[in-house]
Each structure stands twice: as structure tokens, then as C-alpha cells.
Image (tube, rainbow, N blue to C red):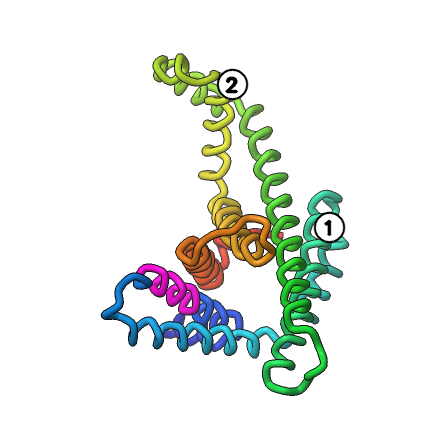
Amino acid sequence: MDAVIKFTSQSQGRDRIFRATQYACALAIYLLRNHSERKDLVAKLKSLEAHMSAGRKLFRLGNTANSIEAAKRTMQLSDRVLSLCLTVANINRALYFFCDNVLWARSVGLIRNIDKERWSVNASRCYFFSLVMNLTRDIYVVLRLMLQKARDKRCRQKMDQHLSESPEVAEAVIPQLDAFIFLLLESLKSDPALALDTLKNICDLFIPLDKLGIYQSHGGVIGFCGLMSSLIGIVTLARPTLRIKP
């Protein structure tokens, strides 16, 4: 119970619960779209989804400053690739939150003379670039882990054993590809935080891709990916050991 209270007392915790609810509603709306007898339920879910989205904007009001501070910290990282990826990601995240704050101000009537659609596209574009840089970081770390695994004698023996025990696989696919997949899976298994972060970023990527028209998805995909990402976010916030660092 204490863990639940501690989690919900954090603005990030509340935001992720709201986000999970928002995308769960989106997924449910898609699944119920052809059920005319559930029209009232769908209307309620749409209303709940809209309220969750609006509520999340309040929780994100101070996140621009947090992202700027995060960018300052990541600039100090000794690994220049990580530093570049994370700094650019945090800067874009700060810009995304700024656009989001402007949209919130417009929705409550504090600002009137702005192009809502333009600001929404800009927000999605910044969010997209932030996710791309975070995914680039994930790929970089995965490749670095794979190289370490490839040099590890015990891992090489395990890989050779795997290849020798699966001759039918070796005939069906390129052995180098099988070895690559083996190293990839071993690397992800050895670092659950990295695996979760990679999966989360991939799921999140579908949202701006759809909004920007780069890759159109239906509501079910967006709802499912958003829900998966939100649940991973809840898990990593509740279990800091599963949060990728830096």
C-alpha cells in the first residue's frame, strides 16, 4: 500500500496512470467500434479519453524545465555518442513540452491567437525526434553489448553450441544472421532495463508517426502501443532498477 501511495504521489506516476487509461480507452473504442449496442459505452470512453488527455497536460506543465536540466546533465557524459543522443533527445523533449504547454494554454483560453494545428504538428515533430534519438541511444548500447558478448569466451561457446544444436535452422537461414539474433537476444536478456526502454520507445514511435502522416496506423495500433508503453513506464517508475541509465 505504501508503494502505491508513493507512486501516485509523484506527478510522473499520476501522468503514467492517466496515460495508460487514455490509451486503454482508445484501444477499447477501436475494439467496440462496430458494436452499435455499445454506442453509449463508446461515447463514455471517448469522454474519459479526452479528460485523461487534458489532465495529463496539467501534469506536464513543469516538464520543459526538467528536460532542459536533463540536457545539461547529459552534455557532461564522457561517452560522446550517448551525450549527443541524450542531449538532442532532451532538447527536443523540452520543445515538445513547450508546444504542449502552449496548446494547453489555448485550450483553457489563456492564449487565443495561435494556430492549434500547427502547434500540434510541431509538438508531434519534436516528440518524434526525441524518440528517434532515444532509440538511437538504445541501438548504440545494444550494439556495444553485442560486441562485448561476442568477445566473451563463455558466450561464444554458448553461441557455437546453439548453432550446432540447430542444424535445421542453419540450413534455413544465414548462419551469420542466426548468430546476430542470438547475440541480440542474449544482450537484451542481460540488460532488462535496456530491453524495456527499447520496446517502450518503439511502441511510442507509432504515435507521432501516425500524427505526422509518415506511417498511418489505425486506432487499435495506437491504443495498443500507447497502452504497452504506458505500462512499461509504470513498471520502470515503480521499479527504478528497471529504468535505463543514463
- Residue shown at 43% from the left, 68% from the top: 22
* Side of 242 relative to 110 (left or right): left
Badge 2: residue crowd in 10 Å (few <14, some 14–19, many ≥20)? few
User: Spatial distance from mark 1 to mark 2, Cα to Cα?
Assistant: 34 Å
Where disc 1 sits, the SS reads loop
The structure residue drawn at horizontal position 38% and vertical position 67%, both measured from the top left corner, is 25
The span shown in magenta is 20-31
Say if residue 235 shows up in the picture.
Answer: no
Residue 238 in percent (x, y) is at: 45, 63
Q: Label 2: state its secondary structure.
A: helix
Image quadrant where residue 81 sits:
top right
Q: Residue at x 59, y 81 (%)?
A: 107
Residue drawn at (34%, 14%) of the image = 168
State the residue in front, 239 or 84. 84
Instruction: Work out which residue is located at the far left of the displayed protein and give it.
Output: 37
* Residue 116 percent across, percent down from the top left: 65, 73
Q: Position of residue 99 (x, y in %)?
A: 67, 70
Identify the residue under disc 1.
77
Question: For the residue marked with disc 2, what is the amino acid?
Answer: Gln
Q: Is residue 27 magenta?
A: yes
For the N terminus, the image quarter is bottom left
Residue type at numbered disc 1: Leu
Q: Which labelled disc corresponds to residue 104?
A: none
- Nearest the eye: 59 or 223: 223
Circle nearer the N terminus (1, 2): 1
Magenta highlight on residue 235: no
Q: Quadrant of residue 228?
A: bottom left
Whether residue 167 can be seen here: yes
Decide whether the magenta segment is chiefly helix, strand or loop.
helix
Circle on res. 176: 2
Label 1 Cα neighbours within 10 Å, binned few <14 / some 14-19 / many ≥20: some
